[in-house]
């Protein structure tokens, strides 16, 4: 399998494979994963797969407490481009994509699943490429928000990541 034609037409060769088969074998539903088996390397401002430091792409992170009441496995799927301490992770128990802040040790909702996350990156990249500057940006950002809301309404819950990103586009 390779990248979907839609994604390849936007990102070309600037894509990296993800371990689709291993993840589905481990129990992630195929429908929760993006089309194809590649994702973009970078999307300006919001995403990078080029991680620095000890944590790499697709590495597991185990969150536990001393008393054993918390034991959560997360899988790293990228980071915010300008702040690689803000990791994007998948929770394999829920399929949800979360943002894990390595500094604050905080977690914030991002998308219902990895498929929705990559679809958001696709629409965001198209928005960035078509952006002609501040005049008219707020209206186009509102259109983007409606497109994204149709893909994943859960991404617009209070305290989720994407509303903060879109708010910056209209500021």
Image (spheres, rainbow, N blue to C red):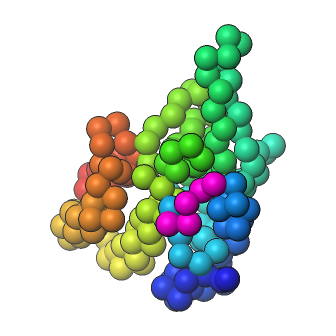
Q: Which SS does the magenta portion mostly show?
A: loop
Q: Between 136 and 55, which is closer to the camera in this rendering?
A: 55
The image shows residue 75 at horizontal and vertical percentages of 66, 47
Number of marks in picture: 0
> In the rendered image, which quarter is residue 101 located in?
top right
| Quarter that holds the N terminus | bottom right
Query: At 31% across and 71% down in the image, what residue appears?
Result: 133
| Residue visible at 32% across and 76% down in the picture | 132
Residue 112 visible? The answer is yes
Q: Is residue 11 visible?
A: no
Residue 134, given in percent of the width and then of the height, sits at: 27, 66
In the rendered image, residue 35, in percent from the top left (x then y), is placed at 53, 76
Q: Residue furthest top?
A: 67
In the figure, residue 140 lies in which quadrant? bottom left
Along the viewing direction, whichever of 97 and 72 lies nearer the viewer: 72
Relative horizontal placement of residue 155, taking residue 89 as reference (left or right)? left
Compared with 23, 157 (above or below) is above
Whole-percent x and y of residue 30?
56, 66
Judged left or right of residue 162, residue 107 is right
Query: What is the residue that sits farthest to the right in this orientation?
Result: 54
Q: Is residue 30 magenta?
A: yes
Residue found 66% across the figure and 38% down from its top: 73
Residue 137 higher or lower than 76, as above or below = below
Please report the bounds of the magenta region as a residue range: 27-31
Q: Nearer the viewer, residue 4 or 14?
A: 4
On the rendered structure, is 129 left or right of 56?
left
Q: Residue at x 60, y 56 (%)?
A: 28
Q: Is residue 30 above or below residue 83?
A: below
Residue 149: say if magenta. no
């Amino acid at each position: 399998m390779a990248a979907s034609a839609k994604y390849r037409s936007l990102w070309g060769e600037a894509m990296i494979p993800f371990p689709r088969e291993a993840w589905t074998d481990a129990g992630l539903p195929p429908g929760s994963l993006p089309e194809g088996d590649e994702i973009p390397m970078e999307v300006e401002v919001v995403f990078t797969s080029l991680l620095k430091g000890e944590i790499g792409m697709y590495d597991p992170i185990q969150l536990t407490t001393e008393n054993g009441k918390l034991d959560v496995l997360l899988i790293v799927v990228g980071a915010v481009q300008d702040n690689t301490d803000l990791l994007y992770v998948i929770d394999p128990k829920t399929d949800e994509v979360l943002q894990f802040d390595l500094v604050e040790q905080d977690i914030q909702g991002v998308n219902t699943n990895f498929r929705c996350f990559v679809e958001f990156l696709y629409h965001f990249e198209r928005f960035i490429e078509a952006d002609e500057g501040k005049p008219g940006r707020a209206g186009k950002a509102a259109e983007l928000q409606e497109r994204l809301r149709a893909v994943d309404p859960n991404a617009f819950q209070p305290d989720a990541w994407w509303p903060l990103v879109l708010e910056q586009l209209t500021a």
